[in-house]
Image (spheres, rainbow, N blue to C red):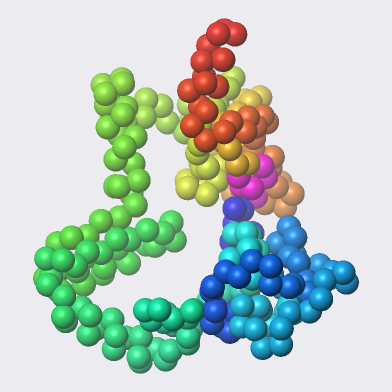
């Protein structure tokens, strides 16, 4: 996802919370409008949905939430209020911030500190936020705190240690400059390591080709707006030169085929 898309999502209007009131999937329920390619489009050939059905958003009788793609769900808007789904309830209902705080505080007071864990994950969190979070965890009496910076890279670190003897990369971003080919397997640096796109754009200017092996063509790898580059910030940069949409679990077969040709 590009930063411009992220900005658009962060400034979207709030969704109609009634759309979350009934999340039960009922196949065959009539829809009045379909949402294709994350944009609503009128459909005159479908009968309108039942009046008052909470599984549809305020924009009209669209398809049930359970039938929407991730892109279509994002288009519903931001979640503006605390929502609660109780046991056996068909969906969520809006609650006040005071009630949300009270429920969270009560559960924390009732829980054994040894059974409380904090997990932080967001590329938007600052060091100050992480610092305060770990202080809160320790104030509550637990040392069970982790974040994506460690757990997401633990498997790759262990694998690299076993493969090449070093649990870290053997090159830096600057080493991409002048490289003939950069290959990404199941990785999306445009989203996971946005700073990397600056070096990918610089490498492409020097003639580097970028290959993406992934079942899904990540939007950010298709085109990305690098803010530190004037041209890219205005017009975008096509990152991936080649995309190989291997099936999930098919990477070994793909590599075997490449090795055979080589």
| Residue 190 lies in the magenta-colored region | no
State the quadrant of the C terminus.
top right
Whether residue 97 is visible, yes or no, is yes
Image coordinates for residue 46, horizontal then vertical, percent = 82, 71
| Residue 224 lies in the magenta-colored region | yes
Asked if 191 appears above or below 80 in the picture, the reply is: above
Asked if 106 appears above or below 206 in the picture, the reply is: below
Image coordinates for residue 148, horizontal then vertical, percent = 34, 52
Image coordinates for residue 176, horizontal then vertical, percent = 52, 28
Quick one: 198 or 190, which is closer to the camera?
Answer: 190
Residue shown at 35%/86% (left/top)?
A: 100
Whether residue 11 is visible, yes or no, is no
Quick one: 252 or 97, which is closer to the camera?
Answer: 252
Q: Which residues are magenta?
A: 218-225
User: Would you identify the image quadrant in which residue 131 lies?
Assistant: bottom left
Residue shown at 18%/60% (left/top)?
A: 144
Asked if 238 appears above or below 135 in the picture, the reply is: above
Image coordinates for residue 200, horizontal then vertical, percent = 57, 36
In the rendered structure, the answer to whether residue 42 lies left or right of residue 239 reads right
In the rendered structure, the answer to whether residue 189 lies left or right of residue 67 reads left
Residue shown at 29%/47% (left/top)?
A: 150
Residue shown at 67%/29% (left/top)?
A: 242
Quick one: 72 or 4, which is closer to the camera?
Answer: 72
């Amino acid at each position: 996802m590009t930063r411009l898309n992220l900005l658009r999502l962060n400034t979207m209007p709030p969704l109609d919370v009634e759309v979350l009131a009934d999340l039960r999937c009922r196949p065959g329920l009539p829809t009045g409008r379909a949402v294709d390619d994350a944009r609503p489009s009128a459909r005159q050939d479908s009968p309108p949905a039942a009046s008052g059905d909470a599984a549809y958003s305020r924009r009209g009788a669209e398809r049930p939430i359970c039938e929407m793609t991730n892109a279509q769900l994002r288009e519903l808007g931001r979640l503006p209020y605390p929502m609660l789904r109780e046991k056996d309830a068909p969906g969520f209902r809006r609650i006040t911030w005071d009630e949300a705080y009270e429920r969270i505080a009560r559960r924390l007071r009732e829980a054994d500190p040894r059974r409380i864990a904090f997990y932080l994950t967001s590329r938007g969190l600052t060091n100050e936020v992480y610092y305060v979070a770990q202080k809160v965890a320790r104030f509550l009496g637990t040392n069970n705190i982790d974040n994506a910076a460690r757990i997401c890279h633990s498997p790759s670190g262990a694998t690299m240690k076993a493969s090449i003897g070093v649990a870290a990369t053997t090159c830096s971003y600057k080493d991409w400059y002048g490289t003939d080919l950069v290959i990404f397997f199941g990785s999306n640096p445009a989203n996971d390591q946005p700073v990397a796109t600056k070096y990918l754009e610089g490498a492409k200017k020097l003639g580097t080709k970028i290959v993406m092996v992934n079942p899904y063509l990540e939007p950010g790898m298709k085109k990305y707006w690098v803010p530190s580059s004037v041209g890219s910030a205005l017009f975008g940069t096509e990152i991936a030169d080649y995309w190989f949409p291997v099936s999930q679990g098919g990477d070994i077969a793909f590599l075997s085929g490449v090795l055979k040709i080589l």
